[in-house]
Image (cartoon, grey):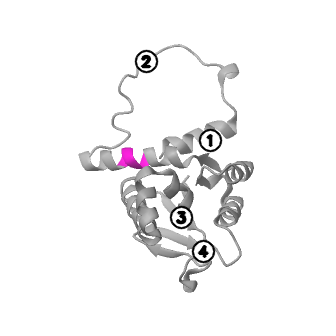
Amino acid sequence: MPVHIIIDGYNLIRQSASLKKIDQNDLQLGREALIDRLAAYKRFKGHQITVVFDGSPDFSHFGSPQQEKGIKVKFSKHGESADAVIKRMASQEREKALIVSSDNDVVRVSASYGAAVISAGEFEEKMALAAMMDIRGQSLESGSSEGWAATTKKKGEGKKLPKKTRRNQKKLTRL
């Protein structure tokens, strides 16, 4: 099942030390730097990505998504927050969505719809790891079997995580 990554744009920018510095100097440059990083991540991983920002100085972008470097960029409408847009998208996408935000309200509501959730800091680490692997020409899966040893130990029903938790963990391992 494909994963649709929905990102709280300003939340991710302001959680990132490097993006925060760019954003403090120029808001537009901060957005562009984030989109550049997301485009590099998308080239390596191939997931559908939508980044949502609060309103735009350019009124032609309100509400309608635009495409930049393969990333869907969506600005909230006048009087609506990006958080509300993300919650609405989570309610529509449900289990197909992975929400990137450190906002507790967005996390709680999105999880209640069945969407997987990851904090902005954790996602930034995943983007950095993917960028590093892309530079080296490696895949994330190639090194994942190192250290694995065959075993006959059975897990049994008592140790199985709930289905919803297993589904969310499966989505997170694809990042």
Identify the residue shown where x is 57% and y is 46%.
119
- Which residue occupies the foreground of this view, 23 or 92? 23
Going from N to C along the chain, the mark reached first, 3 or 1, is: 3
Please check the rendered image and state whether residue 108 is part of the magenta-colored stretch, yes or no: no
Sooner in the amino-acid sequence: mark 3 or mark 4: 3
- Establish if 78 lies above or below 135: below
Sequence order check, earlier mark of 4 and 1: 4
Query: Which numbered disc, 4 or 2, marks the residue closer to the eye?
Result: 4
Which of the two discs, 2 and 1, sits closer to the camera? 1
Amino acid found under the numbered disc labelled 1: Arg
Local secondary structure at mark 2: loop
Mark 3 and mark 1: Cα distance apart in space:
21 Å
Q: Residue 150 shows which numbered tag?
A: 2
Q: Which residue is mark 3?
A: 50
Check if mark 3's residue and mark 1's residue have beta carbons within 8 Å: no
Residue interval drawn in magenta: 126-130
